[in-house]
Amino acid sequence: MLQFVSTRLLRALVTLFIIVTFAFFVLRLAGDPAERFFDPSQTPPEVIDAFRREWGLDQPIWVQFYRYIIAVLHGDLGNSMRENRSAVETVFARLPATLWIMVPTLFLKTAIGVAAGMLAALYRNSVFDRAIMSASIFGFTVPPFVLALVLALVFAVQLRWLPSGGYATPYHMILPIATLSIAGAAVVARYTRSAMVEVLGRPFVRTAAAKGVRSGQVVTKHVLPNAAVPIVTVFGFMMGNVVGGAVVVESVFSWPGIGRLLVTSVQSRDLAVVQVILLLIGVMMVLSNLLIDLLYGLIDPRMRSPKAQTA
Amino acid sequence: MAIEQDGLSTSTEGSVFTEKGKLQTFLQAWPPLVILALAWLALMIFIAIFAPLLTPYDFMAVDVLARLKPPAFFGGAFNHILGTDQLGRDVLSRTLTSIRVSITVAICATMISTAIGVMLGFLAAYFRGWVDQVILTIVDAQLAMPFMIIAIAVLAFLGNSLTIFVMLLGLYGWEQVTRIARGLAISANTQGYAAAAREIGASPWRIYLRHILPNISATIVVAMTLNIPGVILLESSLSFLGIGLQPPQTSLGNMVGYGRDYIQSAPWIMLMPSAIIVITTLSVSIMGDWLRDRIDPTLK
C-alpha cells in the first residue's frame, strides 16, 4: 500500500511540474507582454525597458523560468498587471462565485446521472432505458453555450421566471446550475449505465439472485460496489474540473467567477493571473486524480497490486 | 408463442420471408438513424465544398436598410429566407459560409491530431524504454488538464491567425490516438507479417508505414471520427467566447456568440447556427458509433 501511495504521489508531482512548465513557456514565448501592454510607437523606449526590468522580462528565458519555479515554490506568483494586487488574491477573490455554482452542480449532476444510469441499466432495453439514453446523447452533443442560451431564451426571455444573468440573488444561480447539471448528468448517466450493465451480466450477480437475495440488496451490496470504479473516475474528473469547468457558462450568464476572469485576463494578457488560474486548475485536477487513485485502492483491492497499476 | 408461430408460417411461404429478411438485414446494417446522420453529413460536406456558389449574398455584405429582418415564415420576406442580423447581413449566407469554415477547421484539426498521435504512438512502440515512458507521461499530463483551458491560454497569447487556430485545435485528442496507435503497434509487432517484413530486412519506416499502419488504419479512422465532434464543440465554444476565429471571418460558434446579444429581439441569428452545430455533432457521433460497431467492436 505504501508503494502504491508513493508511486501515485510521484506521478502527481511530475504532472504538476509539466503543467507549471507548460504554463510558463507557452505564456512567455508567445509574445512580449510589454508590447501588448503599451503601444510601441507611442511609448518612449525607456518606459518599456523599465517595465521589462520590473517584470524580469529582460532576462534570458531560462533565467526567468528558474526564478519562476523558485517563486512558485515560495508561493509567490506575481502581481496582477491590471489590478494592483497579487495575482493569487485576484483569483481567489473570484473563487467563491465559481464554487457557488459548481459545488451544487457537482452533487446534482452526480445524483441525477447515477440514478438515471442505474434505472436505465436495470430496465435495459425498455422504453425508459431508450428515453434516458437518447436524452443523454443530447446532453453530450449540445454544446454548453447553446444549452445555456436556449434555457435563457425560454426561462428568462419568454417566460420571465428567472434573471438572464448577474450575481445578485440566489435566483441568479438557477440557470447556470441547471445548464451545467443537465450536461454533466448526461455524461454520468452514460458511464453509470455501461458500468452497471457490465456488472449485471456477471455470474456472481446471478448467484446472489438465485440464492434468494432481495433485488434491492443485490444492487446495493453486489452490483454497485463492483460498478463503482468507472463512476468514481468520472466523478474525480468532474471534481478536478470544479474550478475551470464553467468558463463558457459563466460568460453566458455574466457570472463573476474564475472562468470569466480567465477569459478577460487572457484578452488583456494579464500573465500572472492566467498562470495562477492554470496552476489552480492543474492542482485541482492533479489532487482529485490522486484522491481518486487512492479511492480505487479502497474500493477495489485488486488495484493495489503493482501489476494492476501498469495496466 | 403466437409470434413464433407467425414466424414459422411465413417461413414456409418462401418468397415473403426472404423479402422481409432482406429488408430486416438491410435495416440492421443501416439503421434509419445512421442513414439520416450520413445524409446530413453528406449535405454538410456538400455545403462546405460549394458554399461560395450557394450563398445568395456575400456573407460580409452589409445592408443597413434591412437590419434584423425576421426569417421568411416569421414575418420576413423571401429575399432573406433566414432573416438578417444587426448589420443587415444575410443569415443564410453567413450560416452556409460558417458551415464551410467550421467543417474545414474540424477536419484539418483532426487530421493533424491523428498524424501527431500515430507518430508518437509508433515512436513509443518502436523505441519502448525511456522514450515510451516520456511519451506516456506527457499523455498523462494532457489527460490531467482540460484542453479547453490550455487552448484559451495559448490562443489569446499567440494571437488569432487561422493557421495558429487550426494547429492548436490539431492538438485536441492527440493523446487518445497516441494511446490507441501505441497499443496496436505493440501488438502488431508480435504478429507474423511484421516479423516477416523485418526478417526480409525492411527498414523500421517501411515496416511501420507500409505494413503496420494499413493494418491498424480501420481503428485509427474510427478514433478520428469520434474525435471530430469534440473539435467542432471546442472550435465553436472558443469562437463563441470571442477568442477563436475573429471577425470578419465567420464560424458557427462566432455567429452564436454575437447572436446572443440579440437573443430577445432577433433570436434567429443564434438559433440557426446552434441547431446546425447540434445536429452535426450528433450525426458525427452516430456515424462514429456505427462505424466502431461495424469495423472494430473491441474499441470502446
Image (cartoon, coloured by chain):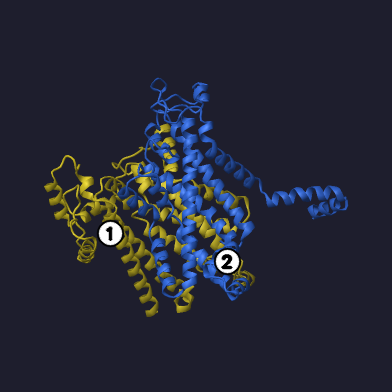
Chain colours: A yellow, B blue
Using the image, tell me which numbered label, if any, was put on residue A24. 1
**Who is closer to the viewer here, B193 or B95?**
B193
Give x and y (percent) for residue B222: 57, 56
Residue type at mark 2 is Ile
Q: Quadrant of the C terminus of chain B?
A: bottom right
**Residue type indicated by callout 1:** Phe
Would residue B74 be found to the left or right of residue A271 on screen? right
Among all residues in the image, which is located at the extreme front?
Answer: B201
Q: Position of residue A278 (x, y in %)?
A: 31, 56
Circle number at residue B147: none
User: Image point 39% across, 38% down: which residue?
Assistant: B257
Q: Is there CB contact under 8 Å for labels 2 and 1?
A: no
Residue A155, quarter of picture? top left
Label 1: how many residues lie within 10 Å, few (<14), some (14-19) or many (20+)? Answer: many
Q: In the picture, residue A58 is in which quadrant?
A: bottom left
Q: Residue at x 59, y 62 (%)?
A: B214
User: Helix or strand or loop: what does disc 1 sit on?
Assistant: helix
User: Considering depth in this image, is B26 or A172 the residue closer to the camera?
Assistant: B26
Q: Which residue is mark 2?
A: B212
Q: Residues within 10 Å of mark 2 (few under 14, many from 20)?
A: many
Instruction: Give SS at disc 2.
Output: helix
Asked if residue A128 shows in the view, the reply is: no
A68 vs B160: above or below: below
Q: Nearer the viewer, residue A2 or B71?
A: B71
In this rendering, is residue B286 above or below A228? Answer: above
Chain at tag 1: A
Report the Cα–Cα distance between label 2 and label 1. 38 Å
Q: Are marks 2 and 1 on the same chain?
A: no
Left or right, residue B87 beside residue B297: left
Query: Which one is closest to the eye, mark 2 or mark 1?
Result: 2
The answer to whether one can see residue B276 in this image is: yes
Marked residue chain, label 2: B
